Amino acid sequence: MTGWRRGFGPVTVLLALLLALPVGRAAAGDQRVAVAEADGGVVRALDMLTGELKDIEIKNGQTKTFRRLVITMRACRYPVDNPSSDAYAYLIIRDVREIKPRFEGWMTAASPALSAMDHPRYDVWVLRCNIPPGKTSSGG
């Protein structure tokens, strides 16, 4: 039993289990989803001090202001097979009193906390993309 503990401790067993998990192309390939580019989307902004909540429609490349925030949308994408299921947008969000953006990157509607803006007063998250008329949950 002493040899078992010395040669195959919990770290060794955990490492062996991790190495046995499927990785690589097959696992990553199963996660791929075809996406389409929308011409813009809708973000929701919250002033946590006053409780003001506002939905803001923004076109790609357009900039809108909410109180002291300047919000620019570079792109909004959605799954082709299920347009109403999720959206993700590339946003640049800057406080007008600062030079450096408070947030720059992709934000997803399904998991806003996954990639969230860090600001003591304001919160912004993606609601949806502007899906062209005629698109259905079957992608056509």
Image (spheres, grey):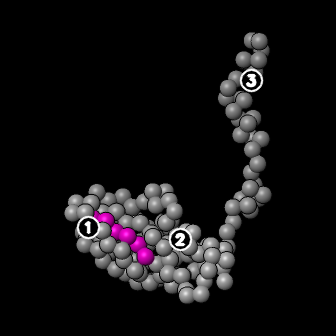
Where residue 68 sits, quadrant-wise, is bottom left
Q: Residue shown at 71%/35% (left/top)?
A: 15
* Dominant secondary structure (helix, strand or loop) of the stretch shown in magenta: strand
Q: Residue 88: x, y in percent?
A: 52, 70
Type of amino acid at the residue the image marks with label 3: Phe
The boundaries of the magenta stretch are: 42-47
The disc, 1 or 2, on the residue closer to the chain's N-terminal end is 1
Q: CA distance from mark 3 to mark 1?
A: 58 Å
- Judge the density around disc 1: few (<14), some (14-19), many (≥20) Cα neighbours within 10 Å: few
Left or right, 87 with reference to 23: left
The disc, 2 or 3, on the residue closer to the chain's N-terminal end is 3
Residue 8 seen from this side: yes
The disc, 3 or 1, on the residue closer to the chain's N-terminal end is 3
Q: Residue shown at 37%/66% (left/top)?
A: 124
SS at mark 2 in the image: loop
Q: Residue shown at 73%/61% (left/top)?
A: 30
Q: Residue shown at 39%/61% (left/top)?
A: 117
Q: CA distance from mark 2 to mark 3?
A: 46 Å
Q: Which residue is mark 1?
A: 52
Disc ID at residue 8: 3
